[in-house]
Structure formats: C-alpha cells, structure tokens
Amino acid sequence: MDNKKSTPDIKPPHELLSGIQSWRPYQSTQPCCEPILHIHAKDLSIRYHQRMALQQVNLAINQGCITALVGPSGCGKTSFLMSINRLTDLIPGCQVSGQLELKGTNILAASANLLQLRRKVGMIFQKPAVFPFSIKRNLEIPLREHGWKDKTTLSSRIESALSQVGLWNEVKDRLDQPAQALSGGQQQRLCLARALVLSPEILLLDEPCSALDPLSSGIVEDLIMDLRGQLTIVIVTHNLAQARRMADHVAVFWSIKGKGQLLEYGPAQSIFDSPQHELTAAYISGARG
Amino acid sequence: MLASSKTIGEKSTTLLVWTAATFIAIPFCWLVGDLLWHGWHHLSLNFVLAVPQNAGREGGIGPILVSTGLIVGVCMAVALPIGVGAALFLSEYTPHDQVSGRLVRGSLDVLAGVPSIIFGLFGNAFFCQTLELGFSILSGGLTLACMVLPILIRTVEESFRAIARDQRLSAAALGLSKKCSIQYILLPAAIPGILVGSILGLGRAMAETAALIFTSGYVDRMPTSLLDSGRALSIHIYDLAMNVAGGNPNAYATALVLVGLLMMINLIASRIAEQWTTKNQLPT
Amino acid sequence: MTLSSNNISSHSKTDLYFSWSLRGCSILAGSLLLLVISFILHEAWPALTQIGLTRFFTDNGWFPTEASYELTPIFWGTILSAGGSIILATPLGMLSAIFCHFYAPPLLARWYRRMIELLAGIPSVVYGFWGLVVLVPLISSWHPPGPSLLAGVLTLTLMITPTIMLITHSSISQVPTTYIHSAVALGLNRWAVIWRIVLPASRIGILTGIFLGLARALGETLAILMVSGNVVQYPSHVFDPIRTLTANIALEMAFALDHHRAALFMSGLFLMSLVLCFVIVAEALRRKTTYAGVK
C-alpha cells in the first residue's frame, strides 16, 4: 500500500498509461456535476487467488456525476465496482490492494466499518435480487437493521422510497404481497428503492438494465437519470448507447494479456467523439470487444 | 436370419425385465394387501385411543402413540436446532474446499451409515448409563436425535446452498450484518427445505426400532414424564409378534397405523418439495 | 479474505457470538461419530483386554454365561444372509430400474417408482412382521422348520432391492441422452443400448447402490431377527436357522452383564467396522461420480 509514487495525489492518473494524452480536469456544464472528488482509486489492484483481474487502476470519480464503466467482459469492471462497497470480501480468494478513498477515507483499511460503508454505498445487480418476502418486508429489513424502528418513520421512508422509483402508485395496495410476483422491471425498481431507502451517498449499478425488456429498461434508466446530482452513480454497462445517453464520465476498461486495466477515462463526450486510445476507438465503433 | 435372432434376443430380455419388475411388485402388493386385509377391520377410533390390555392382545395403542410422539418430539426438538445451526455453519461459513468443513461433512456421511443397532448400543451406554437417564423417553429421543442428524443436516445444507448468491450479495450490499442476513433472509428462504429435512428425519425416527429397544424400553403404560420408559409403535409390533402369543391381530393393526403415518409423512414431504421446486423455477 | 474471516470482523459482537454458536453446533455434529465410536470402544474394552480378540474366533461356541465367546458362526450368519440378499437384490434392483426407465409405459413407470419409494419407506419391523406371519409359514410348509437363512435372505432382499433400484435409476437417468441417441443411430437394439452403453456409463452409481445395500443388509436388525430363527450354528443348508451379529445384540442386551455385555459391545464394534468399510467405499464412489459429473 505504501508503494505510492512521489507524485501528488491529484496527478492525472492517465499519465501512468502510455500513449495517452495528459488528463484534463473535467469541467461540467451541468451545475449538478460539481468537480468535487468523491471516489478516488489509487493504484487499485484486484486479484482472484493468484490471477490479476485488475491492475493498478487510478480513477477519480466526481460527486453527483454518473460515471459509466464500459469495456468487454472479463476486464475487471464489476470487480472494480464491487471493491467500492467491499463486496469483494465475500468472494473467496479475492484480494484488493492499493487505496480506495471515499471523501478522503481509505475504505480498504482493516478498521473500516463495513456495515456503515455498505449503508452509504448502495448497489443494484444485473438480475433483480428481491428477497422472497413481501414488498414491504424487502424495504423493512434494511431499515430495521440500520436502526429505524419507529413504525411511522418506517412507513414514511418506505413510501418515499417507493415513490422515488415510481412504484408507490403501482403497489401501495399490495405491500404485503410477495415481491416475486412483481414483473422484472418492477422488481428492479424495488431493488433500487431498497437501496435508496437507506439514503446512500453512492449508488453502484452492475448492468441494471441488461436483464430487463426495453420498456422497463427505459423506465429504470430514466429513474437513474433523475438521481443524477443527488447521488454519485457508478454504472457498469455493456450498452454503449446507454453509456452515451446517461453518463457524464466514461471509463473504458480493457483486458490486456488477461489483466484488466483502465484504458481511458474522461468526459463522455470526448470519449465518444475523440477517443485517445486506438482500442477505445475500435471498441466504440464496434470493431473490437 | 440375423434379424430373427435379434428379435428373439430382444423378446427374451424384455421378458426378463418384466419378470424382475413383477417379482418386486408381487411381494409389495402382498405385504400391503396383507396389512390392509388383516389390520383394517381391527382399526377403529377406540383402538387408536384405548389402553393396551392383556400384554397388548386386547385394547388399543393410546399410550404407545403418546410415547412415540414424545420420543419423536424429543428427537426433533434436539436435532432441529443443532442440525440447522450446523448446516448454516457448513454452508455459510466454510467454503466448499475448507478442511474443517470437509471433516464435518465426511464424519456426518459416515455417521449416516452406522447401523441403528449400534446407535442403540451407544444410547444405552451414553444416555442411559453415563448420563444416568435410564430407560426413558428422553434417552430414546436423544439416541434418535443422533441418528437423524446426518440426514437432517445434509438436506438443510443443500437448501441453504440452493439460495441464489445474489441474495447474499444484495443483503451484504445493503449493509446487513451476517447474522441479520441469515436470520431475516436465508433462514426464511430455506424454510421449505428445513421442513422437508425435518419431515424426512421424523419419518426415519418413527420407523426406528433397533435403536430404541434398549434406550426407551418396553413399558406400555401412559408416560407421565420424559424420564418414564415408553414403548414406541415399532417396538409394540415387534413385541406383539415375537413375545405375545395371539398378538398378531393387534400387531397388524399397529403396523397399519405405523405404515399409514409414515406414508402420510412422505406424502407431505414430497408435496412441500414439489411446491418449492415449482416456485423456485418461476422466472424471477 | 475469505467469506468467514472478514465478515466476522464486522465489528459486531452479536455477529461473533452467533458465528461461534453455529460453529459449536457443527463441531458437536461433527464429533458425534467420534463419540459413538469411543463409547462403543469404551464398553468393549474389558472384552478386548480380559477376553482377548482371538477367543472370539477360537472358543468353543457362544455360551457367554459360561465364558465361551465364539462369534464365528454368528459372523457366518451375518455374511451369508447379507451376501445372499445382495446376490438376489442386485439383479432385481438393476432390472427393475431398467424396467422403470426403458420398458415401462410412462404412467406405469411413474407408479412403479412411487411403489418402490413406498417400499423403501416401510419400517424394517413391518418387513420382519410380514416375513414372520407370511414367509416363515410358507417355507415351513415346504421344508420345516421355517425360520431360516432362506427366510432371512428373502426378507432382506425385499428390503434392499428398493435401495439398489432407486440409486441405479437415478444414475441411469443421468446418462446423457446423446449417448443413447448415437447408440440407437448406430443401429443397436434396445437391450444392446442398455447393456453396452447405459450400464457401463452408470456403473459407478450402480456400485454405490450395491455397497449401500450391502451396508444396510449387514446392519439390519429387527427384520432378520424376526424371521431367521436365531440359533447359533453353522447352517448346512438354506433351511437351517441362523443368528446374525445384530440379532445377537438385540436378543441378549436386555440381560447381559459384565463380560457378556462387553462381548456384545465387541460384536457391535466388529459389525460397525464391517459396515463402515462398505459405507466409506460407497461414499468415495459417490464423490467420484459427483466430481466426474462436474467435469
């Protein structure tokens, strides 16, 4: 962890990668996307047993932005995402090294409070993973566990979370029915509500729309766009059109000789319009990946 | 020429297979028919409730049903919490390749194969004598608990492993502690599997005889406490058939009750398992 | 950074207590086998030290009250009854599994399988009772006395055939259909497909079934006790009564004292080692199939 180079912390990470021009701090035109550093990965590497899945990633994610992680399968995007809430701990044989700071606190430190961390960092998976209980219970379990016991608070938080994802009017009469009875899109929105009910600061999305039909996918996408500015959102996606529609920043990951690496990072527009790396250009044009 | 010899071969093997199948079916029908034929007209509400008289030749099986219920109850009350706890530990805390998990699993697999009479010997030495519980319902129930633990743990562990990994990840991603995620998410989700496991264990406990002969004893009176000796249904059948001349009619009726109970138990278990699998196969 | 180590360090005492109580349950369950073995050994110890292992084979007959502890005829009773039943049950079980999978019409196959499952669920005491009231008189009318090795073998056969059938059935249904289709495409007839392709492909499963059946036959107590006459002797033909290790224990435990009791535990130890050999082989085979299946 202490193999830090003498360069200052905010040193553009892309100078470390050869063949890439120096990094320009992104100045957003949208007021919600302030250039305040929220998630900062420094020399982050992830290993599965002895296999290097992600090598020395340096990435600074701004507060309130939507940052899309794109790239072919197996290049370490999801591993990177899961290291932000340390869900990597649950994967046998997975080791994370380097530093990962949330607002300046290294969450990879042994002293990090995992439960608090995960409360502040919500996560949505590819397949909607609703718990096999009632809709209400799905939201109640995390709330109760994090200390909200009062009945009226519980129900008001549940209502506001469900409203936020546009589910309230659809399900308010059947809160006690099993969540699996909902459609795929509704289940994914319930998962979103379940993450939002804890008022997180960061939302991690692992291909949240890829298991949904186009219509539900559009609804979920709009919801995520609505959250822009309120939360820092990191989304893994295979759908480049989606990344182009949603993201403020795009990070392109690539697997080089079996090791995942960060290829290019910058404002969405510049990545899509004038990619710096030839692999990125090929990937975006559809020639590679 | 070739074709005809082939058909003869095919015909004779078909005959062989059908004959073997019939050879199994005949004694089955005979056994069940025999039980029904001799036992049915003996069966009545009075028989089920009444106290056995004249060493069981007359009267009913009331106290024996109560004793059986108590023995099986003690067995499940002890085996269920330990079994679920061990299954949880094996599935949630030990990766598949870890040595400690493999040791426990291996030891349980071997334990499942130990003959029931050996459990009887063990129960007699350990519970009756060392722990000084004597010939009692408690001793019998505890002995049976040792016997059903392996099958219980294996079924319950499988039902925990069948829960999707996404559920665990989502729970962790919400900042739920391990205990909370087990208590509120995994345990409720595995309840059908736990039920099936307990019912299978219950069936095995109820069918058992050899492990009970010298742990719970023979006394056919109504038990007043768990430290009383109590006679299980299976032992009643054994005793009537072997030691009581003229006990056969009541033995038939008791056997019919026992087999009926066990079939009911199996039916319930397979119903639950069926419903569970169809529910799990629904698109999520 | 495995699942266990890191989540236990989730800074929560309740979590720690919880995981330790689960660990306790699993240690308790895992050490049960050791407990059983050590108690049987403890009770058998006087027999081992004061009677000695060899006298169980060299004494003149089984008269425990007169300090004569020869177990050899009882061993033979156990081996002959279990061996005889496995010889009968193996082909019957295999053929009925084949019947169920390849020959029976679907509806009949379903009912047949259900019947076998019921048969597997009938308690041994009921088999014993049926053998006593139906089989034994039948044999007696053919060749007295009736309670005999034959009655024991037949009862055990009836009990272990379902075990073998069910395991064989499940392992032949795991044979990939592509094997069967390509065999049929080669012009093999039904029996040839079964004999040349299906049975060899599922041989490990079948072997597992046979070993488990054998273990069950060796350890069976009540059924064999009720039908086989329980005379301690070397049987000269199948109509002679025999006594098995299990029956010996069940019959004499009630009044056995001191050395007699220790000798009974000793015979339990013999029985257990014999059965566990087969169980361990069956388990090893089962693991082999699951690993092969994964690959």
Image (cartoon, rainbow, N blue to C red):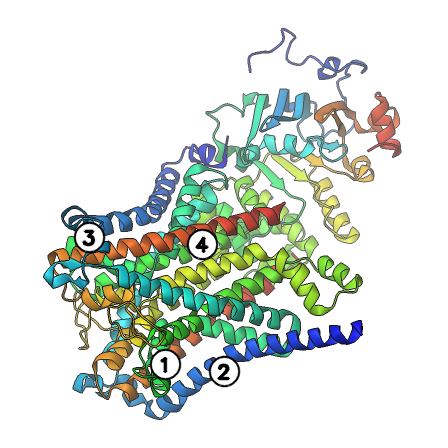
Tag 3 subunit: C
- Circles 1 and 3 on the same chain: yes
Pointer 1: residues within 10 angstroms few (<14), some, or many (20+)?
many
Q: Are marks 2 and 1 in contact (CB under 8 Å)?
A: no
Find the distance from the CA under tag 4 to the CA under tag 1: 32 Å
Q: Amino acid at mark 3?
A: Arg
Foreground of the two, C144 or A31: C144
Q: Amino acid at mark 2?
A: Ile
| Residue B166, x across and y down, in percent | 59, 46
Q: Which mark is residue C46?
A: none
Find the distance from the CA under tag 1 to the CA under tag 3: 37 Å
Mark nearer the viewer, 1 or 3: 3
Secondary structure at badge 4 equals helix
Left or right position of A147 against A74: left
Left or right position of B262 against C257: right
| Residue A62, x across and y down, in percent | 68, 26
The residue where tag 4 is placed is: B154
Q: Quadrant of residue B240?
A: bottom left
Q: Amino acid at mark 1?
A: Trp
Tag 2 subunit: B
Q: Which mark is residue B26?
A: 2
Secondary structure at badge 3 equals helix
Find the distance from the CA under tag 4 to the CA under tag 3: 41 Å
Left or right position of C31 against A66: left
Q: Which mark is residue C55?
A: 3
Residue that appears at 32% across and 66% down: C77
Find the distance from the CA under tag 3 to the CA under tag 2: 45 Å
Mark nearer the viewer, 2 or 4: 2
- Image quadrant in which the C terminus of chain A is located: top right
| Residue A45, x across and y down, in percent | 62, 23
Tag 1 subunit: C
